[in-house]
Each structure stands twice: as C-alpha cells, then as structure tokens.
Image (tube, grey):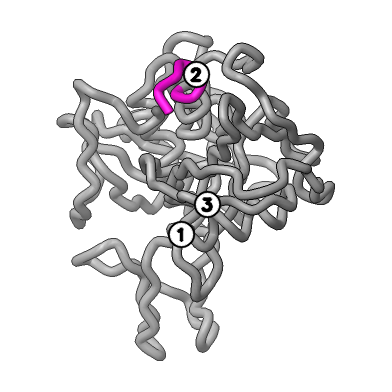
Amino acid sequence: MIQDIYPHAYHNEYHDLQPQENDFILIFHKNKALVRYNGEKLRYPTFNELKGFECAYHYLFSIDEYKYFLAYPSEQLLKNTDQGTPSILLSGYRYEDVRIFRSAPSKHNAFAGITAHHLFSWYQSNQFCGCCGQRMVPDHNERMLYCPSCHNMVYPKISPAVIVGVLNGNKILMSKYAGRPYTNYALIAGFTEIGECAEQTVAREVMEEVGIKVKNIRYYKSQPWAFSGSLLMGFFCDLDGSDKITLDTSELAEAGWFSREEIPLEDDHISLTREMIMQFKRGNV
C-alpha cells in the first residue's frame, strides 16, 4: 500500500527546525504540488533552490535522513500575485495534481507528497481561531496551532473511515462511486459518525448505500489515506438475509455481486480497498 515504503523509514516526530540547503520543500497551490516529474522520477525543490523567495517554513517529517518542509509564501508575495496563480514558480518544475501520487513509481516520495498535502490542508483551514477569530500561531514543542488570544489549541485532523468487503459465499459486493474522478470498482466505504464505533459504521454504511444487512463483522487492516485526510479501517463481513441491492444513487453509480473469477481488477499496491479485493480474488478470505 502507499505507506509501505520499506526499506525507507518514515519519521513523523515533530521537531522545531528550519530547513538547510539540501532539505526538500513541499509547495502546494490548492490541490496541486510543485514537482519535477517525468513519469518515472519524482523530485521536489530543495531549500537552496528557493532562496530567491520570501517564505515561511514548517517542518513536516523525515524519510531516512532526508527532511521535508512545507513552504508558505510571504504575505507581500501573495499580495503581488494573482489569486488564481501560484505565487512560487521554479524553472524545471511544474504544478501537478496531487493524484499523481497514486501512480508515481517512487513510492517513498509519493507518500511524502500526499502526506505533506494532508498537513498543508490542515494548516490552510486553521489559519484563524474557530473560537475567537484571531490568527493562529504554530507551537514550537509539538505539531499544534495555538491561539494567543483565547488559548484554543488545534491538532491535525484525521477522520476515521471504514472500507467494507461484504461477502456472499463465493461473491463479494463491489461498487462504483457516483460523480467522482475515480471510476474503477471499489468497496463500500464511509466515515465514522459521532457516537458510533467502527463496527457500527460498517453496518450503517452498507445499509445506507446498498440496503442490505451484514453480520460477522471482522477487522482486517488499517491504512493512512491522506487523499481524504483519513485513517481507513478495513473490515470483512457476511451477508445477513436478502442479497437484493437497493442503490443509493447519490453515493453510488452501480453495485453488484462478483465471483472471484469475475473480478476485473489487479493489485495496484496502493490502496487498502484494492488489497482487500485481491485478498478475496486469490481465495485468502
């Protein structure tokens, strides 16, 4: 899966650091990242390459001995730039949609990119205090934003969600999302709501999206999925009663039961969803 970057090692401990010349700098404009990418090699700018720009930096994490930082352009630079245009442009680099991280061959760099975008989105959406409206400031001891006026503290947001493999004998339930860029088959999925445990989320989401009951809910594996700011929890369960599908068309374009031989997908080595489908296809569940 996307977080499986061995033999590289991911270190997410927070440190109050400033970048050095060869440290990697992540720069985003909305859902695009500034990268050098030719379909094989994926590279980010270094601090040395950004010395002509006025930026603020947040330390993100390290992979092996390499440090990764998030860059923010200065207020003056933002004022002098059209709001629809990126404020930092570098020769040899271009802004690419973050979805390239799903398929980039350099797995540890792809994981770094999408994890950095998760943190970028959190910093962007918490610039001002939700209690009093004052500007938030970064803490120097831990990854947290702090309001100096009312002392509100905000930590990175991670949303728990479930991926569900519903089994019916020699068949698994697969579906396609409605109105999303991803058009391949997937499994039933959804976010955990306030006051419910993950197993209750499984039963509720399956009922809401396809109108069937399930039993024997059992945990499989989890995955950080920064594309949606989530911690995904995979479960398998069994059909309980009728296999008639009542489709929630606001969420799904289609859904159906597939035998192992009918599954048209192969492993992408990226997502928990695909791994669970492959586990069923190979007869491991």
Residue 281 sits inside the magenta stretch: yes
Residue, disc 1: 198
Residue, disc 3: 215
Q: Are marks 3 and 2 in contact (CB under 8 Å)?
A: no
In the picture shown, does residue 153 fall above or below 230? Answer: below
Question: Would residue 221 be found to the left or right of residue 96 on screen?
Answer: left
Magenta segment, which residues?
279-285
What kind of residue is marked 3? Lys
Q: Nearer the viewer, mark 3 or mark 2?
A: 3
- Which disc, if any, is residue 220? none
Check the picture and name the quadrant holding the N terminus. top left
Spatial CA distance of label 3 from label 2 is 29 Å
Residue, disc 2: 268
Q: Earlier in the sequence, mark 2 or mark 1?
A: 1
Spatial CA distance of label 3 from label 1 is 14 Å
What kind of residue is marked 1? Ala
